[in-house]
Amino acid sequence: MPLSAPVARQHLHTRRVTCTGHFRDDGLFDIEGTITDAKTYEQDNEWRGPLKAGDYVHNMSIRLTIDRKMVIHDVEACTDHSPYRICGDVAPNFKALIGLRISGGFLKAARERVGGTKGCTHIVELLGPVGTTAYQTISSDKADELSREHWHKELAARGESPPPKRKLEIEDYRAPSVMNTCHAWAEDGQVIRRWAPLFYSGPERESVRAEAEARVKAGLPPEA
């Protein structure tokens, strides 16, 4: 359901945030984010001169190279358009994010390293959606498939074979990291009941969990 029709108004500003996730040939992942700001009217800039409607006031990007555990291996940041000549000088400072893990507390740790005068407000703002994009990229069947294929190629190059698949036990399963982070993923809701029945706590939880446990013991995934 879209937003309701607005009252009469004038469009003044557009901010766009675009994030993408990529699997690399070396088995790592690149997560990229770009943020742009543009006005719908002409304005003057002391450094750049007149800016036409639609010209970027801000155009900044960042790339995080991470592994499957969400640990940052490399960082590249750039400023293509900014209101001041010196804005891009801090781009190398974002290398300080290397070694951090994208998980709880990531944004706080990132701000300690590149916040304030050590960084750029807009690139730091990008780290939120970039972090979410990292999770969406890696927590997917396709990412699992590509990572597995890469691992098999590495083993084959060394003349090794992958170990036999081990039957999963109930103790091997973990609650989804998104459980209880929003309405849809409430532990007593239908999404958890459908996709993570071992951790369902709503009505009929005993029978739902018992059925899921029986499937695991039979060598099947817990969800029907």
Image (cartoon, rainbow, N blue to C red):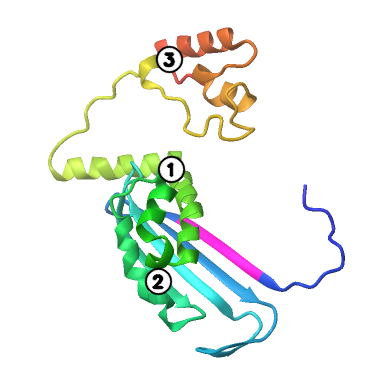
| Residue topped by disc 1 | 142
Q: Residues within 10 Å of mark 3 (few under 14, many from 20)?
A: some
Give the residue furthest to the front. Answer: 117
Q: Mark on residue 78?
A: 2
- Disc 1 is placed on an element classified as helix
Q: Give the Cα separation between the discs numbered 1 and 3.
A: 23 Å
Does the CB distance between marks 2 and 1 fall below 8 Å?
no
Any magenta on residue 100? no
Q: Position of residue 49 (x, y in %)?
A: 55, 92
Name the spot of residue 39 as percent of width and height, x first.
Answer: 65, 77
- Going by the numbered disc 1, the residue's amino acid type is Lys
Stretch in magenta: 14-20
Q: Is residue 196 above or below residue 108?
A: above
Q: Nearer the viewer, mark 3 or mark 2?
A: 2
Q: Nearer the viewer, residue 144 or 204?
A: 204
Identify the disc placed on residue 59: none
- Graded by Cα atoms within 10 Å as few (under 14), some (14 to 19) or many (20 or more), the crowding at tag 2 reads some
